[in-house]
Image: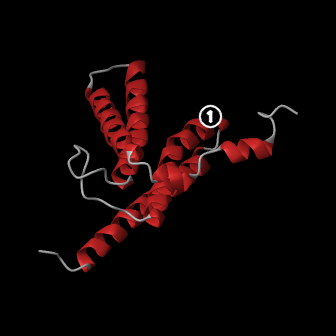
Amino acid sequence: MDRLMDVGHVAETLPDLSEALEDPRLRQFGLVGGVGLVAVGALLSLAPASGQWLFWSYAVAATLVFIGVPLLCLGLAAPDPEPGSLFHLGIELTATQRRAVALGSLCITVTPIVIAVGTPLGLPTLVLAIAAATAVVGSVLVLTGFVAWTSAAIAEPSRH
């Protein structure tokens, strides 16, 4: 059997999620990519459009924002680079908090995909309910990671 078709070999070569979330380069990628996608989505939603282009303009803008915001959250959750770096923000989440933010970001990213795939199947109420639940769960997970870090940062005594 070809090594690419061998499930065991492919599973061994996949990167570890914890290792990927510990990479400080994720901060730059997430912040620049997330802000860029949200900015393009916002500008696209402000662009004048009419007729059939109005729907597609808003659909693409919403999709860009729904992908940009989780990417921005992943960038904020990434390990802080060295203090002299442009991307040093002082946000240092634990590994568990990073996993919560990553899982929440995945849930939020899946939401427009659920709507795009499920709506043509003729189940709009069920699709919207699943998409809404996925977005809420994802938002709660992202907020849980950042609120846990914030409460820990507030609880520790300040150092002068």
Q: Please, what secondary structure does the residue beneath circle 1 have?
A: helix
Display coloring: secondary structure
The residue wearing badge 1 is 120
Q: Nearer the viewer, residue 93 or 122?
A: 93
How dense is the environment of label 1, judged by Cα within 10 Å: few (below 14), some, or many (20 and up)?
Answer: few
Residue 143 vs 128, above or below: the answer is below
Of all residues, the one furthest to the left in this rendering is 160
Please state the horizontal and vertical placement of residue 54, each as a whole percent of the image: 37, 24
- What is the x, y in percent for residue 50? 33, 19
Identify the residue at image location x=65%, y=39%. Answer: 122
Residue 33 vs residue 58, the one in the foreground: 33
Instruction: Depth check: give the residue in front, 82 or 30.
Output: 82
Residue 69 spot, x, y in % from top left: 37, 45
Q: Is residue 80 left or right of residue 141?
A: left
Asked if residue 76 shows in the view, the reply is: yes
Give the residue type that dot 1 points to: Pro
Q: Is residue 44 left or right of residue 125?
A: left
Could you tell me which residue is drawn at 43 percent across and 36 percent down?
63
Percent across and percent down for residue 56 are 43, 25
Q: How many numbered circles are shown?
A: 1
**Observer able to see residue 129:** no
Q: Nearer the viewer, residue 136 or 2?
A: 2
Q: Is residue 58 above or below residue 115?
A: above
The quadrant the N terminus occupies is top right
Q: Quadrant of residue 160?
A: bottom left
Q: Residue at x 59, y 51 (%)?
A: 16
Q: Is residue 16 left or right of residue 153?
A: right
